Image: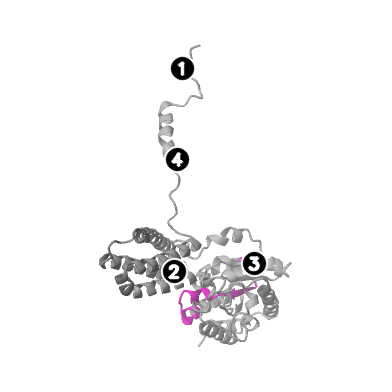
Amino acid sequence: MRLRAPDSSRRDAIPAGILAAILCAAPALAQPAPPNPLLPAKQLLELYNRVLQLMESTTLATPELSRAGAPIGENAKQAFINVQKTPASSEFNYAFLVNLRAYLALADSVPKPFPFPDEARQQFAELRDDLNRIESHFRAMIGREDHQIRDPDRDNLKRYFDADEKTPPPIPGKPRVVFLGDSITDGWRLNEYFPDQDFINRGISGQITGQMLGRMKQDVIDLKPVAVLILAGTNDLARGTLPVPVENDYLMIADLADHYHIKVIFASVLPVSDYHKDVNPAYEQTKIRPPIYIHALNEWLQSFCSQRNYTYLDYYSAMVDKNGAMQADLADDGLHPNSKGYRIMAPLAQAAIQRTVASGPMQHEQKRHRLFSVGK
């Protein structure tokens, strides 16, 4: 039986040019995606720990390196401790990378015993492979940070854009309140703690006060709330920002709310603790969020609220312990409230909202005075 050649006149026949293009593209489509050079935090810390072990063992095989490389080894250990706390810090990752480079450069320059153990040669080879891997990770980290800097949506307005568009107007007699904040607000399931209330969550994890200021129009003002409850500032401190620039952002957020006849509730910055750092070194919170700065921000906020007749919502006093830290059982990481922490916060927020909503409308002249009376 002879096979017939395909009938090119059939309508379902594939033209030769298109078929050739598909066949040429097929190998490229089949290729797997290149691996992500960015290491997850767990793998990164495991790699750094292995590097420190290799540095220590190779110094034992090279006496000259043991003496000359001791300061470099100590610097690398300190960098590792810092990376454990903040794995996403390019500064601390770079410090570790620089010290590893210095160690290998020193290893190449010092005399080695003869015969040199094969195991030590293998360890140095592994160290150089690890150096290449860490350099790839660091370049990817810098690229990611550069992308974030160039991001056209710096304030992440896209996060709630669709939800804002679909939010109906407020219902008469049911006061609407927008909760504006960072991860502490973002992770708060408001509908569970405040059932049958028109409370809208507009928290975004990781945000600083300047980004919340950029979201005021879309995520607060356009929703036409009676009041806005602002919980912000802890991430500014974690980035090394001093209290004064944060206070300036507070003031501009408040001025916008005043202009659009929205009542203002400022919540205190929550305390932090180091009680859980044995579980994870990253849970040592007080070094990057110094309690003295938290206290300074809260003092300023309380004074500012008193001056402008805003509501000051004092979470801090209800959640701090005798050591000036977040009570150990209110946050599993020393920063973010757990369910017990939110159960303490919820009635305080409800009382502050009721008190604020019940207050009369601000008189025009009184408002005008506040708008131009900057907190001094």
Asked if the stretch drawn in magenta spans residue 62, the answer is: no
Q: Where are the magenta residues, as a range?
A: 223-247
Q: Which element type, helix, strand or loop, lies under badge 2?
A: loop
Check the image and name the residue furthest to the front: 115
Left or right: 68 with respect to 81? Answer: left
Seen in the picture, residue 326 relative to 97 is either above or below; the reply is below
Q: Earlier in the sequence, mark 4 or mark 2?
A: 4
Q: Earlier in the sequence, mark 2 or mark 3?
A: 2
> As shown in the figure, which amino acid type bears the numbered disc 4?
Leu
Q: Disc 2 to disc 1, how far (Cα)?
A: 65 Å
Q: What numbered label is drawn on residue 29?
A: 4
Question: Mark 4: few, some, or many residues within 10 Å (few <14, many ≥20)?
Answer: few
Q: Earlier in the sequence, mark 1 or mark 3?
A: 1
- Which residue is at the front of the view, 163 or 280? 280
Q: Earlier in the sequence, mark 3 or mark 4?
A: 4
Q: Disc 2 to disc 3, how far (Cα)?
A: 33 Å
> As shown in the figure, which amino acid type bears the numbered disc 1?
Ala
> As shown in the figure, which amino acid type bears the numbered disc 3?
Ile
Seen in the picture, residue 370 relative to 8 is either above or below; the reply is below
Q: Disc 4 to disc 1, how far (Cα)?
A: 29 Å
